[in-house]
Amino acid sequence: MAQSDIRYLTPINIEIKKDKYCRFKKSGIKYIDYKNPDFLLKFINEQGKILPRRVTGTSQKFQKKVNKAVKRARHLAILPYVADLMK
Amino acid sequence: MNRYETVFILTPVLSEEQAKEAVKVYEDYITKNGGKIKHNEFWGLKKLAYQIQKKSTGFYNLVEFENDGTLIKKLEVEFKRDERIMRFLTVRMEKDHVAFAEKTRNAAKAEA
């Protein structure tokens, strides 16, 4: 948040409109590998659930690839189905 | 000729050599039945994210091979029959997947 020099009584929380972008389109990643867990960890929350698109901002095409990769990793016990306070 | 990638997990009860032998058995099975092995990776003993058959570690192995598709059913029956194998996953590789695999392999080779 910009350090405004005027001090308000209650800090006004201006909602900074961060425009979400699909990180795959931007970085040009074509294929999401289901075998390396550290990359997939970015797309699941602490309980091991897959993060929704509205949070990560990925496009539908790549969200489906992420889902498929995460589910394959779970099948191969690379990622847990249910986890508590993972990462 | 499609390109396939199979990852399978062997029980940790086996020793390192026995695990390697089991992998060898499946390599020969693939080559004998019309598959051409492109790449073989033995990841060794790794911790599983959850217990499979009451075990929490397992020998992972990845085999990448080419085949027209008839071998897959037979190979999976073999996997099911063999009790050393705890879990397996066969994936048909798309164009991007093949490119990705090639790139990572060359990068690894360049490093080594």
Image (cartoon, coloured by chain):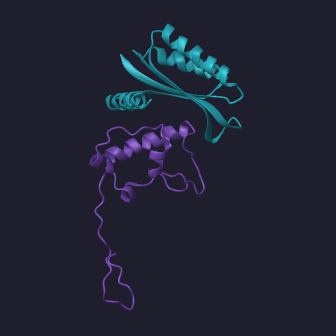
Chain colours: A purple, B cyan
Residue B63 coordinates in the image, percent (x, y): 49, 23
Q: Is residue B24 above or below residue A37?
A: above
- Residue at the spot 37% in from the left edge and 47% down from the top edge: A63
Question: Residue A15, percent across and down?
Answer: 32, 74
Which image quarter is the C terminus of chain B in?
A: top left
Q: Residue furthest top?
A: B32
Total marks placed: 0
Q: Residue B100 sits in which quadrant? A: top left
Does residue B51 lie above or below B79 as drawn?
below
Q: Tell me the residue at 53%/15% (across/down).
A: B27
Q: Nearer the viewer, residue B107 or B111?
A: B111
Residue occupying image coordinates x 39% and y 29%: B110
Q: Position of residue A19 (x, y in %)?
A: 28, 62
Left or right: where does residue A71 sit relative to residue A60?
A: right
Q: Give the quadrant of the N terminus of chain B.
A: top left
Q: Residue B44: name its quadrant.
A: top right
- Horizontal side of residue B52 vs A40, given as left or right: right
Please, which residue is most extreme toward the bottom here? A9
Q: Residue at x 67, y 20 (%)?
A: B18
Counting from the top left corner in percent of width and height, residue A71 is at 49, 41
